[in-house]
Amino acid sequence: MALAQDVLNRLSSVLDADAVLTAKEDLIPYSFDGTAAQQEMPGAVVFPRSTGQVAAVLKLAHETGVPVVTRGSGTGLSGGSLPVPDCVVLCLVRMDRILEVDAANLTLLAEAGATTQAITEAAAAAGLFYPPDPGSMKISSVGGNVAENSGGLRGLKYGVTRDYVMGLEVVLADGEVIWTGNKCVKDVAGYSLKDLFVGSEGTLGVITKVLLKLIPQPEAKRTLVATYARMDQAAQTVSDIIAAQIIPCTLEFLDRTTIHCVDDYAKIGLPRDCEALLLMETDGPAPVVEQEAARMEEIARRNECKEIHVAKDAAEADRLASARRTAFSALARVSPTTILEDVTVPRSELAHMVRFVAEVAKRHDLRVGTFGHMGDGNLHPTFLTDERDEAAMQRVEAAFEEIFAEAIRLGGTITGEHGVGVAKKHFLAQQAGEPGLRVMRELRRVLDPKGILNPGKVLDQRPLNE
Ligand SMILES: Cc1cc2nc3c(=O)[nH]c(=O)nc-3n(C[C@H](O)[C@H](O)[C@H](O)COP(=O)(O)OP(=O)(O)OC[C@H]3O[C@@H](n4cnc5c(N)ncnc54)[C@H](O)[C@@H]3O)c2cc1C
């Protein structure tokens, strides 16, 4: 711990009595996030309770040059909230109030530390719907969702977090507080600053409040599970459903390894003698749902699914969707280290990409489970390995390099939802190109001239005098 005593004293003076941690044993839980094989000790962890306290911490950091790593619930999968040496981790979980549900304007205002689940439940209590549902929604914070522009199982039909952000309160690097956006459906006054902060991964400002759009609850839902002997048949089913102009709210894929791990974990009796499983959900007005479910079933059968099962009630549908949400945790149980990625390709390239991942894993002698949001083209190849085995870790790295290069070659992206963080910043140039990176660097310098916000994440910053 090398933060100056003076800085610690000043932090304590602007925060509540129990809001500054400095003992090593207290700091350890904040020395990593959901990303495998990455750890760094911070100098201190602080827990503000108000925007004013966040502003006071940032003013102090700006003045003293102390780096600040903003943290929500620490579930990130690209090392975004991983500390940098001797930084202050600014953890927002105590700012977790739902401030307003405005049923007249269909909006919800919350502090950034509120969990995604709490937002969903507050909306539902008012008879409304907040669709973004990352697999981590029970614990992830809405500030983290905005900072990563998180997606979820319902992304295909309902979009991602960005599509629901109407306004943000943000504390800038020097402690100044701005509000961007409002409850208006239309607003074209000036640059859309809120869109700049969505997906900014804690590098441009600290989000303290989030104004979200809510929508009416869908009237009905149907959930189907189809299994296939061959991956191609599942991929073709997805293509045919989209070509039939059906946009299901969920169209998820699990490969054989993932099916086995999920069933061992969730014990819901998934069929095991198959190569691929599709979880499909349609929602909306009841007659439309009935019609779409019937057409999806017919398309699945036409593509020679082995079995198709329609959930008999809401409880079974929830069980199936929850089982899919456990995919990452289920895979994580079977090996000491689980490295999960989220390459995304145009949907027409999905079958090729799944095959490519399997072939790369075989060539590098690695075990992989692949699942993902098939309808979005967003795949999660997950390597099951052991970080103590250096040679295996090098092989994982080499495999990912090939996978990212292939995704870019196919017109895809190195990350569809988990962000760049530290894990993927060396691949960003390949995708954004040098002019794109220069604009990103310049934007960052304007908003954070001293480079104190989440340094070293997303981009390698250049010295100020360059
Ligand atoms: C089991 C599991 C399942 C997951 N499933 C999904 C999924 O389906 N879809 C998906 O998109 N992601 C998923 N994730 C990844 C992760 O949960 C999301 O990125 C989530 O939005 C992170 O929220 P958090 O509160 O944990 O943020 P953290 O991990 O604490 O932070 C993430 C990033 O956001 C920044 N940040 C956090 N809060 C703020 C703030 N208030 N202001 C500014 N910057 C901030 C941090 O600096 C960091 O760069 C999953 C993770 C796990 C472990």
Image (spheres, rainbow, N blue to C red):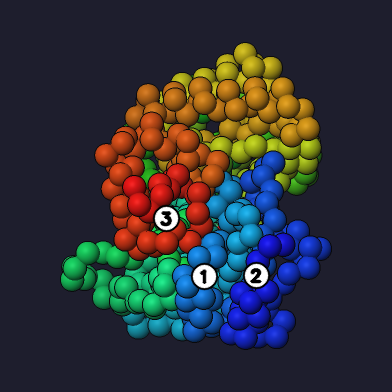
Q: Amino acid at mark 1?
A: Thr
Neighbour tally class for label 1: few under 14, some 14-19, many 20 plus, Cα within 10 Å: few
x and y percentages locating residue 194 in the rendered image: 33, 65
Residue placed most toward the observer, 323 or 82: 82
Which residue corresponds to mark 3? 199
Specify whether 337 is left or right of 89: right
Residue placed most toward the observer, 64 or 94: 64
Quarter holding residue 263? top right
Answer whether labels 2 and 1 touch (C-beta < 8 Å).
yes
Neighbour tally class for label 2: few under 14, some 14-19, many 20 plus, Cα within 10 Å: few
| Alpha carbons under labels 2 and 1: distance apart | 10 Å
Q: Secondary structure at mark 3?
A: loop
Whichever of callouts 2 and 3 sits on the residue coming sooner in the sequence is 2
| Alpha carbons under labels 1 and 3: distance apart | 27 Å
x and y percentages locating residue 258 in the rendered image: 67, 34
Q: Which residue is depicted at the point 65% across and 25% down?
A: 394
Where in the image, quadrant-wise, is ligand 1 located?
A: bottom right
**Any part of residue 1 in sight:** yes
x and y percentages locating residue 311 in the rendered image: 61, 48
Q: Is residue 78 above or below residue 164?
A: above
Q: Secondary structure at mark 1?
A: helix
Which residue corresponds to mark 1? 64
Farthest top residue in view: 363
Whichever of callouts 2 and 1 sits on the residue coming sooner in the sequence is 2
Residue placed most toward the observer, 118 or 72: 72
Which residue corresponds to mark 2? 4
